[in-house]
Amino acid sequence: MFRFSALLTLLTLLPVVTPAQIQIGTIKGAITDPAGAAVTAARVRLINPLTGEQLETTSDRAGGFVFHNVIFNRYALQVEAPGFEPQSRQVAVHSNLPLELEIRLSVAGTSVQLSVSASDQLVEPDQNGATTLTRNLIGRAPRLNRNRQLQELIATTPGWATENNGLIHVRGVDDGVLYVVDGIPITDRLDSVSASSFDTDTINALQVVTGNIPAEFGGRNGAVVIIQPQSGIDQRLNGSLRAGAGDFRTGDLAAALGSSFRKRFGIFANAATSRSDRFLDPVDPRNFNNRGGAVNLNLRADWHPTERDTVLFNVSGNGADFRVPNDLAQELHGQRQRQQLRDSSQSASWQHLFSTSTVANLAFFHRRHQSELFGSENDLPLSARQDRSHTRTGLIASLTHQHRGHTLKSGLEASRIAPREFFTFYITDKEAAVERDISDAALKFDQDDPFIFRDARVRGQFSFYVQDSFSLRRSLTVQAGLRYDHTSLLVSAQQFSPRLGIVYFISQTKTAIRASFNRLFQPPQVDNLLLSASEQARALSPFASENHGGATIQPERVSAYEAGFAQDVAGWFRLDAAYWWRNFRNVGDPNVFFNTTLIFPNSVAKGFSRGVDVRLDVPERRGWSGWLSYTNMRILQTGPINGGLFLTEEFIEIGPGTRFIPDQDQRNTGSFGLAYRHQRSGLRVAFTGRHESGVPLEVESERLEELRSAPGAELVNFDRHRVRPRTILNLSVGLSLFSRERVNCDLQFDVLNLSDQLFAYNFGNPFEGTHFGYGRRLSGGLKIEFR
C-alpha cells in the first residue's frame, strides 16, 4: 500500500497526463510482378465505400508505397499499373500498428488471380456504431458560424441535442465530449463562451463514438470525438486561401499551407479570422450588443526520423473578443459588457515501432485557457468582473501488442491541473434587481461592499487502463477493458471502470449485432470550479438550507448500456440503430450566471436517460449521396443540487428525492442531408435540415406568468411548458469556377434557415437563461487551392 501511495504521489507531481495513443494508422506495401520484380509508378488508391474518403499515391522505384495518417476504418485498396490486371482487396486499420502488404500483380489478359476482390459492403464484422465524417462532407458545410462549426457537424450524428452558443449534449450528458487529437485528449469546454473550438479547415476527418467507449478514453462521460488533423506528409507543396462574407457584417478569411520534405518531414499551417455582429445567440430577439471576432492559428508537423519512429508536433494559439448580448432594459441603460478568451496548446507525440506486432507511444502536452469578463459603467441590475485561467500540462504513455489475434493495449495517465480564479459582482440598481427576483442574500452586495472571490489551487489526476480486442470466432468480436481513475479535483475520488463490447456479424445478411456496457467517470469541469464549490457560493445557493444542497461537487459516475445493429441493405445504404440507457450519479449540469456568458458547474444527485438512435447513410452513386439521423430520448433527474452560483429565487423546489426534467431534455431530434455533385462541371448542391422538439420550462407557476409577457414569448408553448419545436432547413450551392492541374477556384453560397423561422433555444430557464436562434442567414465564400 505504501508503494502504491508513493506512486500516486509521484505521478500527481508530474504535468497533466491524459490517455490514449496516436489514433491514426499506416498502410505500407510492395508491388511486384509475377516474377517478383518491382512495379514502379503503379497507381494505388485507398477508398472507403461509405464515406467516399479517398487517398491516392504511386509506387516508387522499389515498388513501395505508404499511406500515413489513416483514420481507423475499413477500406478498399485498389492497384492499377499499365500492362497488369487491376487488383483490389479489403484492408482494415484499427490500431497504430502499421499494416504491411505484399501485392503481386497479374499480367493483363491472364487468368491468374492472386488476391481477394474488395467488397463494397457497408457493414463490417466489427461494426461498433461510430460515425465517421470525412473532409468531403466537412468542406461542404456552411461557414456562417465558423466559431461553432465543429459542434454543428458533430450534432449531425445521432444522440445529440444542440443549445445556444455551440453547446451540445449527448445521451443526457451536458457537454461531456472528449476530443482526441493525435492521441492527445482534451476535456475542456470548447463552446463559444468558454474557449475556441477547432478550425474545421484543419480537420481531415473526425469520428464520433457514443456507444461502446474503449477503456483508453476517460475524463468525459458523453462521447469521444477523434479528430484527424490535416498533414503535410506525403503531400507536395499545396495551400489554400478562402474569403467569405455574410449578413450582420459577417466575414472570415483563412489561409493554409502544407508540404512534405524528402518524405521524412511534413508541415501544415493554417490561420483563420472571423467577425460578426451576431457573434453569439442573443438574449433578446432584436440582437443587442452582439459584436465579436475570433482568430485561430494552428501548426502541425510530422517527422519520420527512421522507418520505426514517428514524431508529431501540434501548436495552436486562439483568441476571441466579443460583447455580452443585452436584453432590452440593459440596452436602453447603455450596458456594454465584454469578454475575451485566450487559449493555447502545444503537444509532441513520439511513436516507436519495436516490431510489426509491438508499438509504444509517449506524448507531452500543455494547454492554457484564460477568460476575462469586463463590466461597464451602465451595467444593470448588477456589474460583474472575472479573470480566471487554468493550465493542463502532461505526459502520456501507452503500449500496443498483437498476439495470436489479440490486440492488447495498456496505458498510464497522470495529471496536474492548476486553476486560478478571481470574480466580483455588486448590485447597481436594487429596484431592478428585485424585479428580476435576485435573492436577498445577493442584494446586500453593493459598490461599497462587493462580492469578491479569489483562489488558486493545484490538483492531480491519475489513470491507467488495460484492454483487449479479439475474435472468439470469425463472427464474434469482443472488446474488453478495465480503467482506473483517481482525481483530487476538488475532492478525492476514484473508480474502477469495466468496459465490454461485443459484435456478432451475420455474413449471409451483412448484419452486425452489438451490445456494450461501460462504466464512466467524469471529474467536474474546471471552469469556475473553485468558486462553484466554495462556501461563499453556498451562502447564496437557494438549495443549501431547506433543500439540503451543498457546495461539494463530486465526479459524475455513469453506467451506460447499449444494444443495436447495423444492416447493409443491398449495398445501397447502411442502417444503424441502437437502444441505449444511462444511469447517473452526481450529474454535471452547469448554470449560467444571471444573463451573462459565465458558466458555473453544479451537480444533481442522480438521474437517468434512455433513448433510441437511428442513422441512415447512403454512399455516393451517380453524384447523389445522403444521410439521416434521428434520436428519441427522455431525461429525468433527482435532487438535491450542489455547487453552482445562483443569485435568483426563481427555481422550483428541488430537494432530496425531487424529480425534474433538466434543460437539455429534447424528446425528438433529427437531421438530414441530401447532396449532389456533378463531376464534370464541379457543381455541388447540399440540402440539409435539423429538427428539435424543444426544451422544458422548469420554473414556478408565478414565474410562468411573468414569462408570458417577455420578448419572444410567442416562441414558447406555455400549455406544454416547453419551447416550441423548430425545423431549420439549409441550402448550400458550390461551383468550381475553374480547375487546372495545379489550381482550383471554388465558389460557395449558403442559405441557413430557408423558411426564416424564428425560434428560441431556451426561455427563462434558471440554468441556461434565454437565448434566441437566427432567422434567414446568407453568406458566400471564394476558395482558391493550389497543389
Image (cartoon, rainbow, N blue to C red):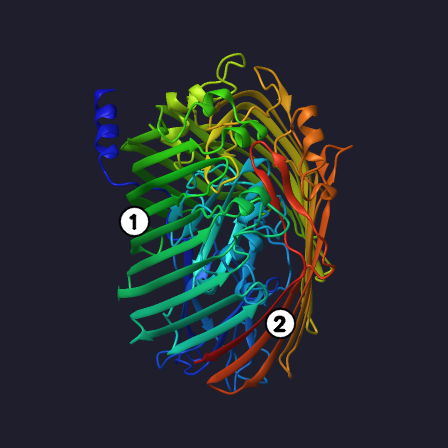
Secondary element type, mark 2? strand
Which residue does the numbered mark 1 point to in the structure image? Answer: 365
- Residue 20, position as x, y percentages in the image: 38, 45
Task: Decide which of 459, 593 is in the foreground and name it.
Answer: 593
Q: Quadrant of residue 652?
A: top right
Q: Quadrant of residue 620?
A: bottom right
Q: Quadrant of residue 654?
A: top right
- Residue 109, position as x, y percentages in the image: 59, 85
- Residue 491, position as x, y percentages in the image: 36, 24
Above or below — where is 68 with respect to 641? Answer: below
Between disc 1 and disc 2, whose residue precedes?
Answer: 1
Residue at image coords 52%, 32%:
589
Residue at image coords 63%, 40%:
762
Task: Using residue 750 as the reference point, say whether residue 187 is left or right of it.
Answer: left
Residue at image coords 41%, 83%:
40
Task: Decide which of 26, 349 is in the foreground and name it.
Answer: 349
Task: Using residue 216 as the reference point, say whether residue 512 is left or right of it.
Answer: right
Secondary element type, mark 1? strand
Above or below — where is 123 with respect to 651? Answer: below
Is residue 538 visible in the rendered image? The answer is: yes
Q: Residue furthest top?
A: 546
| Mark 1 and mark 2: Cα distance apart in space | 39 Å
Task: Decide which of 542, 66 is in the foreground and name it.
Answer: 542
Q: Residues within 10 Å of mark 1 (few under 14, many from 20)?
A: many
Residue type, mark 2 in image: Phe
Q: Residues within 10 Å of mark 2 (few under 14, many from 20)?
A: many
Which residue does the numbered mark 2 point to in the structure image? Answer: 749
